[in-house]
Amino acid sequence: MKNIITQFSRVFVGILFIISGLIKLNDPIGFAFKLEEYFSEPVLNLPFLEPLALAIAVFMVILEVVLGVMLLVGFKPKFTIWSLLLMIVFFTFLTFYSAYFNKVTDCGCFGDALKLTPWESFTKDIVLLFFILILFFNIKFIKPLFNSKVNTGIVLVTLLLCSFMAYWVLNHLPLKDFRAYKVGTNIEKDMSFPADAEPAVIDMIFVYKVDGVNKEFTDKQLMDIPAGAEFVERRDNIISAGYLPPIHDFTMEKDDVDHTAEFLAEPKLMIFLTYDLEIADDAGLKKLEALNLEATSKGYKVIGMTASNAGVIAKIRAKYNFTFDYYFADSITLKTIERANPSIVILKKGTVTKKIHHNDIKDLKL
C-alpha cells in the first residue's frame, strides 16, 4: 500500500511541477514581474533582488520542469526530493504571507493560464507539501525507470529544451498567449458590462516614491505624479464586489484628455508599446521611427503608449527623432498587453490583430 501511495504521489507531483513550470516558462517575463512584486518594499522589502528578478524567474521555472522530470524517471531521488521539499516550503511561505497579509493578489503559480486567489494558492501548496512529504518519508520506493545513462540523457535533453524555450520566448513572444489582450480580443467588448451585471467598485491606488517618501495617487491623479517619481506598486482596493470585465484598466490619455474611444474606433492603429522608456531596449527603439514612416504611408494611425512621465518622453523623442505622439497608460496594463519593451501592437477598430516583438519587426507585413 505504501508503494502504491508513493508512486501516485510521484506521478502527481512530477506532472504538476512540469505543467506549472512549462506554463511559466512560456512567459518568464510575466513571472519576473510577479517576483518583483514580491521583492518590493511593501511586500518582502527586498528591493536589491528586483534587478535579478528575470534571472531568478528563468532559473526557477527551468528548475521546476527539470525536477518534475527527474522525479518521474527516478534520477538522483534524494537530491530531487530534497529540492522539491525546499522549493515547496518556500512557495508555501510566500502564498501564506500573500494570503494572510493580502499583499499579492495572484501568486502567478500558473501564469495567466489559471488565476488563483491567495488562499487558493496556499491550499494548493499545502496539498503539494503533503504529497512531497509522502515521497520524503518513502524515498526507498523511488526507483529509476531506466539505467543511469538513459536517465542522465533524459534530464540533460529536458534542460537543453527548457533553456532553448526560455531563450526563444525572451527574444520573441510567448508560444501561447493567455493574457486578456491576446490576438483576436476586442478591447471595447471586453471592457463592457452585460446589461444585468452589477459593476464592481474598485479604487486603483498607485504608490510612487517622491523625494524618498511613498505617496499614494488615485487613478484620477496620475497626471499629477511629479517628474522623477519612482513607481512602487499598484493596489486594487475592492469597495464592493460585482462583475469585473476581463479588461478594466485600459486607457489612452494625453494632457488629461482620454482618447480611448477615439483610438479604439481607428480602422488601422499601430501602437508602439513601451511600458518604461528609460529601460527600453535601445536596438528596439532605433527601429520604431522607420516603421512609423512606413506604416503612416500605408494609412495607419501610429501612436506610442507608455507609463513614463513627460520629461522622459521628451528626452526619448529627441534622442531617437520620433515624430509620433506618446499617450499615457498604467504600467501594469502595458506589461499585461505585451512583455517586450518596446513591442508593436496593431488594432483594427479595437480588435487586436497582431502583436510583434521588436526583434521581429523585419517580419511584419503591413
Image (cartoon, rainbow, N blue to C red):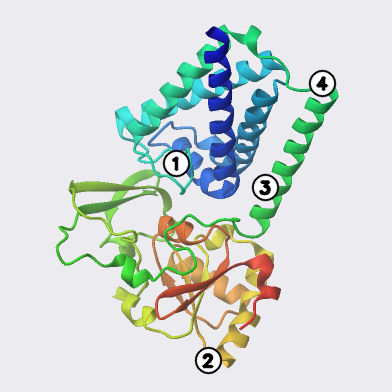
Residue at figure coordinates x 25%, y 62% from the top left: 220
Circle 4 SS class: loop
Q: Amino acid at mark 3?
A: Ala
Q: Nearer the viewer, mark 3 or mark 1?
A: 3
Packing grade of label 4 (10 A; few <14, some 14-19, many >=20) is few
Q: Amino acid at mark 2?
A: Gly
Q: Nearer the viewer, mark 2 or mark 4?
A: 4
**Residue of label 3:** 166
Earlier in the chain: of badge 3 and badge 1, it is 1
Q: CA distance from mark 3 to mark 4?
A: 29 Å
Q: CA distance from mark 1 to mark 4?
A: 43 Å
Packing grade of label 1 (10 A; few <14, some 14-19, many >=20) is many
Earlier in the chain: of badge 3 and badge 4, it is 4
Q: Nearer the viewer, residue 290 or 321?
A: 290
Q: Nearer the viewer, residue 273 or 196?
A: 196
Circle 3 SS class: helix
66 on left or right of 110:
right
**Residue of label 1:** 37
Q: Is residue 136 above or below residue 292?
A: above
Cβ–Cβ below 8 Å for labels 3 and 1? no
